[in-house]
Amino acid sequence: MRLLFQTSDEDDFFGGFRDFFDSGTWFVIRNLLLFLVVVFWLATAYWVFKDARRRIEDRWLVAVATLLGLVPPFLGAVIYMLFRPPEYLDDVRERALEIKEMEERLGGRDLRCPVCRAEVDASFLVCPVCTTKLKQACAGCKAPLDPLWQICPYCETPIETPASMELGDSWGATAPPRRERRRR
Ligand SMILES: [Zn+2]
Ligand SMILES: [Zn+2]
């Protein structure tokens, strides 16, 4: 009796399922789900297209990436994410510009007066705008000298900067007495 009751209950249950799948409600829900899946599929493909356009310069490669985003559905987008270029084109261009600027600065092509920021040439001895002294002239050939140079590279005249003269004086003043003390 109990068993019979159960089976009839199960029959009702599955019968209800069958009725449900045969009904118009299931038809509507299935179509709605299919529609959502298709929308999501197209959205992922569109996302791949947008992302590829920001990362890849070549138009054909962008087209290939978009195609991959469409076929196979969903999996193609994941594959694209694994192999896409790591950087955006804008970032790459910006960095290239920064490097170029840095190189120009290091190359001395963008020299400026430390006082008035006017553009000056590497060969200037004074700033033509504010008359600040920029470089020392060689005593032999009058060439503009770099502050780090010890000798003029154009005429081989040794450079006597105020710093080196001070150093020489202090050596001359302090070194001999020490030697005398040691000898005693
Ligand atoms: Zn100046
Ligand atoms: Zn010189």
Image (cartoon, rainbow, N blue to C red):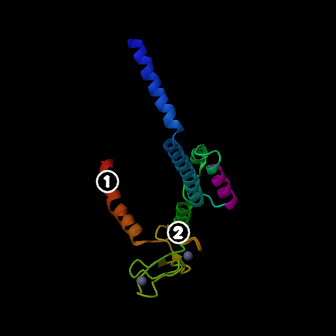
Dot 2 amino acid type: Glu
Secondary structure, magenta segment, majority class: helix
| Image location of residue 179, percent across then percent down | 34, 52
Label 1 SS: helix
Mark 1 Cα-neighbour bin, 10 Å: few <14, some 14–19, many ≥20? few
Residue shown at the point (48%, 27%) measured from the top left: 14
User: Of discs 2 and 1, which sits in the foreground?
Assistant: 2
Q: In this view, does 130 lie to the left or right of 184?
A: right
Q: Quadrant of the N terminus?
A: top left
Q: Can residue 33 be seen in this view?
A: yes
Q: In this view, does 88 lie to the left or right of 10?
A: right
| Image location of residue 15, percent across then percent down | 49, 29
Q: What stretch is highlighted in magenta?
A: 59-68
Dot 1 amino acid type: Arg
Q: Camera-side residue: 119 or 136?
A: 119
Residue shown at the point (65%, 57%) measured from the top left: 62
Q: Does the magenta run of residues contain 63?
A: yes
| Image location of residue 181, percent across then percent down | 29, 51
Reading the image, the residue beneath label 1 is: 178
| Image location of residue 19, percent across then percent down | 50, 34
Reading the image, the residue beneath label 2 is: 101
Q: How far apart are marks 2 and 1 (CA)?
A: 53 Å
